[in-house]
Amino acid sequence: MPLQNHNVAREWFNTIFYGGLIAIIFRSLLLEPFNIPSGSMIPSLHVGDHIFVQKWAYGYSRFSFPFGSWNLWDGRFFAKHEPKVGDIVVFRKPNGNVEYVKRLIGQSGDTIQMKEGRLYINDKLVVRKDAKPYIVANLPKSMRSVGFYKDNMSIKGNKIWIDNKPAPFNYTIEYKSDRLCKMSPYECGVFNATEYTEVLPNGVEHKIIEMSDNASLDNTEKFTVPEKHLFFMGDNRDNSADSRTEAVSYVNRDNVLGNVWFIWYSHNYYSPMLAVWNWNNKMRWDRFGMGKKQ
């Protein structure tokens, strides 16, 4: 009997050990899951999107593995190709342990500048076209069932209606805690923005939103990207801590973890998965399995 107990304990240990080892290898070499905690990449990524990041596309650095903050080596290996301007990339914040997701805007040697809300790359104005209204709705959870109503607009669950018809424009809806909305009312509300299609110099087209063209990061100095570094920006241009700020600045090539592959799950507020009665208003079914957006 003692021998049998010993074998059971060893089997449990082996199961936990090898299961953990497989998970570490999978996350380090193949795909790593992340969830989107902020609106800096709206309209491409929404708060509550859960994404998979490809780890093999750009090769591996020490940050690809557990304990990557330990300075074990520099450089990357097994890189299939370099990140290209327009890619949506997850990277480790310089001098920190926080992961960010942003769009690659500039590579080594490029100059980047914002003037009156317009992006200039290497002193050339980047095309911005197809202006359309966009709504960012951050509402208290108590409204997810009863709905929000103002003038000819109504918001309920994951949908916006104008004059009792589906809204003819794009939007994102997130439900925040009632307590947060009371303590920080400026974070909750229905905010009007403008959606544009931006055309980067290499021909990549992607969506951005602007609240205005005169926000704090809409007029910047001219940045020159150093060697072996990258310059990132959020698609939500007026609500993104990115390379335009001192907190992020230029990102070393080694800090890149991989590029966003697809959204595998998305919800508009936290609720236990067992609360199936909330699924209809919680799940963004149309975003499940969505590939990365340019």
Image (cartoon, grey):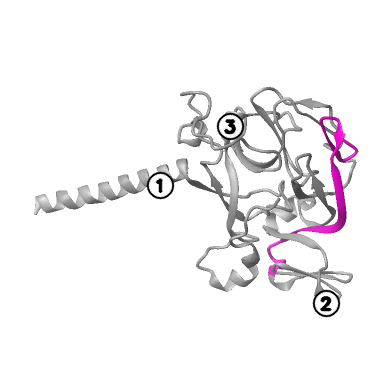
Q: Amino acid at mark 2?
A: Asn
Q: Residues within 10 Å of mark 2 (few under 14, many from 20)?
A: few
Residue 88 point in image, percent of width and height: 66, 44
Q: Which residues are magenta?
A: 115-144
* N-term mark: 1 or 3: 1
- Name the magenta segment's main secondary structure: strand
Under circle 2, the secondary element is loop
> Does 141 appear in magenta?
yes
Give the residue pinned by disc 1. 23
Give the residue pinned by disc 2. 164
Under circle 1, the secondary element is helix
* N-term mark: 3 or 2: 2
The residue positioned 76% from the left and 55% from the top of the image is 188
How far separated are the C-alphas under marks 3 and 2?
A: 48 Å
* N-term mark: 2 or 1: 1
How far separated are the C-alphas under marks 1 and 3?
A: 21 Å
